Amino acid sequence: MNRNDAPKAPAKTTPATFHVKSFGCQMNVYDGERMAEMLGTRGMTAAADGAQADLVILNTCHIREKAVDKVYSDIGRLRREDGSRPMIAVAGCVAQAEGAEISRRAKSVDIVVGPQAYHRLPDLIDKAGRGEEAVDTDMPAASKFGALPGRSKQARPTAFLTIMEGCDKFCTYCVVPYTRGAEISRSWTAILDEAKALVDGGAREITLLGQNVNAWTGEDDRGRMQGMDGLVRELAKIDALKRIRYTTSHPNDMSDGLIAAHGEVDKLMPFLHLPVQSGNDRVLRAMNRSHTADSYLRIIERVRQARPDIAISGDFIVGFPGESDAEFEDTLKIVEQVRYAQCYSFKYSPRPGTPAADMDGQIPMDVMDDRLARLQALLNRQQAEFNAATVGRRTDILLERQGRYPGQLIGKSPWLQSVYFTVSPTMPDLSIGDMVEVDIISAGANSLAGEPSRRKAA
Ligand code: SAM
Ligand code: SF4
């Protein structure tokens, strides 16, 4: 590989320290943690930031254009004042989508590794250290999970656990089926073993992850086919595990069993992230979503019957090719009908290789800007209303971290809101990972203020 025009090569060919920077979804955060744990078991040490690391791994996201641009600007910024740079690895979905093209475009990139191949990072690091091309975007038949070391002690009381990968849905705007491959569920035993290891390592809340996490299916230890609800019920038996969440769900995989579990499993938190994308049926068909606005609303209704206080979250795309003003209004309408607790909303971003990128009727940026602003104003209002409605409630929060001010602690409510409070001198010692009962006394746009009523047994 010609590196003549690259910044000065890394000083150390065998890196001793590393830094992983993850972009995008929670699955990337999880992958980044697994990479870090794997390198840790190989004797490498985590550096506080990229400036101090011998190896920097940019764990990328390809879902929208800006995310890709950010990776290239980050690569540029890794050059140090003396002209040197760390060894640079690009991992994640940009690596999968662009492969060796990345190291052609950014000559300082030493390693390119896709999301299904990162268990081979140690070999790639050795190769890069020898100055050889180190590109691996294989999607091997044998899952990477079996090749990764077990979970180590957890730095936080909340942990992610990927239970299934890939996607077979092929929404016409989305790169995930191409970058993450076909839908594959991890085994019942592998998931339960990892959950137990996370809890032994200090986790008190586990969020199950998958691009369509509720499509998970597998045989339990007695050979019976189970859906994700079965898995949730089994996880709930782990005594020291206090809370279970999952994300992201697809409306078509919202089974009766899972809806019932929301009413029956106390540890399953009253929060559902269920993206609808658009409130208009023609747009939903063009997106290949295979649900309608009405079928989505019926699911929400049934989930609310099972768990009346459930917080609903979602994803929206504005400006999908061909979306008319009236069709966009249908999106505002469905938002009014659902009343969301918090949401993500995006301008449509054409992704190379996806069907929608070649569709007629691409929407001008100023129109998308305007639609996004209107949608977000409505969603923000609903979030504020949802938060305000919690004032006066008494609820448990799981303490996650210290706050900015002395004595301030921050935790999450069951509805995934950040709640902060200040410890008074008369209070018993509280630790991160404790569950505390608080009264919610006021609400802001993004967080709530609480007052502890009493300390709960952990
Ligand atoms: N599997 C989930 C589902 O079907 O709802 C979503 C996973 S996707 C990684 C996360 C979100 O990114 C999507 O729900 C969608 O709103 C957004 N997204 C995906 N492709 C996009 C694109 N080309 N432009 C804008 N937003 C996009
Ligand atoms: Fe992408 Fe659609 Fe699959 Fe979600 S369901 S990951 S939006 S293709």
Image: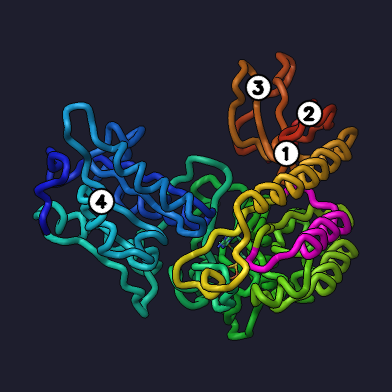
* Residue 184 located left or right of residue 107: right
Q: Any mark on residue 397, and which?
A: 1
Q: Any mark on residue 106, and which?
A: 4
Tell me where residue 320 appears, x and y as whole percent. 64, 64
Magenta stretch secondary structure, dominant: helix
Mark 3 near mark 2, Cβ–Cβ under 8 Å? no
Residue 12: quarter of image = top left
Mark 2 element type:
strand
Mark 2 near mark 1, Cβ–Cβ under 8 Å? yes
In space, the residues marked 1 and 4 are separated at their CA atoms by 45 Å
Circle 4 residues within 10 Å: few <14, some 14–19, many ≥20? some
Give the mark nearer the N terminus: 3 vs 2.
Answer: 3
Please give the count of numbered marks on the rendered protein: 4
The residue to which callout 3 is attached is: 408
Report ligand 1 position as a quadrant. bottom right
The residue to which callout 2 is attached is: 450
Magenta region includes residue 337:
yes
Give the mark nearer the N terminus: 4 vs 3.
Answer: 4
What residue span does the magenta drawing correspond to? 320-342
Circle 1 residues within 10 Å: few <14, some 14–19, many ≥20? many
Mark 4 near mark 2, Cβ–Cβ under 8 Å? no
- Give the label, 4 or 2, closer to the camera: 4
